[in-house]
Structure formats: C-alpha cells, structure tokens
Amino acid sequence: MSSSPELAGTLSAEALAEKYGLSKSSVRPAFGDYVRDLWSRRQFVVSYARARIYAAYAGARLGSLWQVLTPLLNAAVYYMVFGLMMKAASNVENYTAFLISGIFVFTYTQRSVMEGTRSISANMSLIRTLHFPRATLPFAYVMNELMVFARLGAFVGDIAQIMPFALRTWLYVSGVFFSIPAALAGKPWWIAQLITLNPAAAYIDIVRQSLLAHHEAHSLPNAWPIAIGWALVALVGGFWYFWRAEDRYGRG
C-alpha cells in the first residue's frame, strides 16, 4: 500500500530522504574517492584550459602569442627602469637574460594566483548546475595546485581585490630585477631569512641556474630544498584545504 500525501507530510526531510533513497548532492566525498574522481576528469581539465586560452585571445590577431609577448614587453619596461635608470644591470652579468627569466617565472606565478582566486566565484552557475569535483576548476585555470587561494577567493570576495597589491609587493621582493645576495649585503639577518624563504625567489633562482652560465655569484642558498618544500605545501596542504570545503562551494 502506497503512503498517502498526508502521511508523507508528517515525515521530516531526513526521513523522506532515507525512505526514497535520496542523498545530499553537496556532501563532501571521502578524500580517496575525491582524488579518483578528479583523476577521471583529467581530460576535462586539459580541454577546459585550452578552451580558456583560445577564448582569451580569440579577438587578437596574434592570438596566444601574447602569452609570450606580454612578459617580454614588461621586461623591456623594467629594463629601462631598473636596468638603466637604477643601474641594476651594472651589477649582473647578462642582465637581459637575468631579467627576462625572472619576469617569465613570476608572471606565471602571478597569473596562477589571480586565476586560482577567481576560479570558484567566476563559475558559480556551472558549480550549481553540475556535480563534479570542484578542484577541476583551479586545475584547469592554472594547471597547477594553488587550492588555498581558490578556497579563499570562493568565500572572501575581497581577496581578489587585495591580491594585486600583495602580488606587486611579492614581485619587488623576489629578486626579479636585482641580485638578492648583493641586495642583502649588510642587511639584518631576519630580512635575509625572509627573502631566501620566498618561494618565488627560489623558483626564479633555479630557472636562472639552469639557463645562465655565470649565475653562481647571485644564486640563493638552499634554493632546491626551499622550492621542493613549498611545492609539497602547495600540492598536499593546499589540495587538502580546498577539499575540506568541497560541500560549501556554490552556496549563498
């Protein structure tokens, strides 16, 4: 005998869900299941990232070539300001390559942080329509794991407004325009510690070590351990932090 509408109306929402085999669509899955589901969407991550690049430069004659031209044009401006006017080029051999390598690494870092911050808030309609692991969005936006910024940007709208100022400060302390060891000479030890623990400075230094023949005088101590440590923090810690709020994305 089927239950009457009057009887169904006396049941709580939880009882009705249990009676008809329903479950919450926003329940956070187990971490292992979440990782497997995310891995199964890897083709979507790659395809979505390519589609975004195509859409971003669809109206430009040079297309995605601007991904390379933009950092080069920035490097030309910074070379005039820092290399010539502030004479930073006189202290670094092959300053042009030194500057360009730093610009490319930091530009990628900057774009990753900004895009990761907006990856959830900019896709609310998609999140509220389809069920899928939300981590695919920051992955597709940056092809890198910056989940901490993605979660913060999802719930704190002002983060996206603050980020440009924070990134500008980060740019100036990452050794993009100058030799960090030369700049730290005679400075208090705690300033040197903060600068050398900067992840952007470590990654920039590693790239310069691989590209520049005379970079030993300007290299940072322990760049590889610092870079590996930050990579683990961003990947493992950031991913776990993002997953913890999986059932909250799309609300509000």
Image: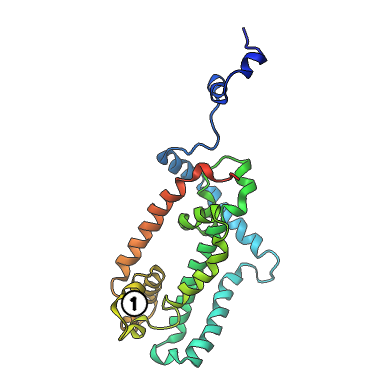
- Say above or below: 78 vs 63: below
Judge from the rendering whether residue 172 lies leftward or rightward of residue 15; answer left or right: left
Give residue 179's position: percent from left, percent from top: 38, 83
Question: Quarter holding the N terminus?
Answer: top right
Could you tell me if residue 228 is visible in this image? yes
- Say above or below: 192 vs 36: below
- Say above or below: 214 vs 125: below
The chosen color scheme is rainbow
Q: Using the image as rendered, state which of residue 199 and residue 170 is in the foreground.
A: 170
Judge from the rendering whether residue 151 lies leftward or rightward of residue 227; answer left or right: right
Give residue 153's position: percent from left, percent from top: 54, 56
Extreme-front residue of the structure: 10
Name the image quarter holding residue 229: bottom left
Q: Residue at x 38, y 80 (%)?
A: 212
Looking at the rendered structure, the secondary structure element under dot 1 is helix
Q: Using the image as rendered, state which of residue 22 and residue 186 is in the foreground.
A: 186
Give residue 162's position: percent from left, percent from top: 54, 66
Judge from the rendering whether residue 145 lies leftward or rightward of residue 137; answer left or right: left
Mark 1 = which residue?
191
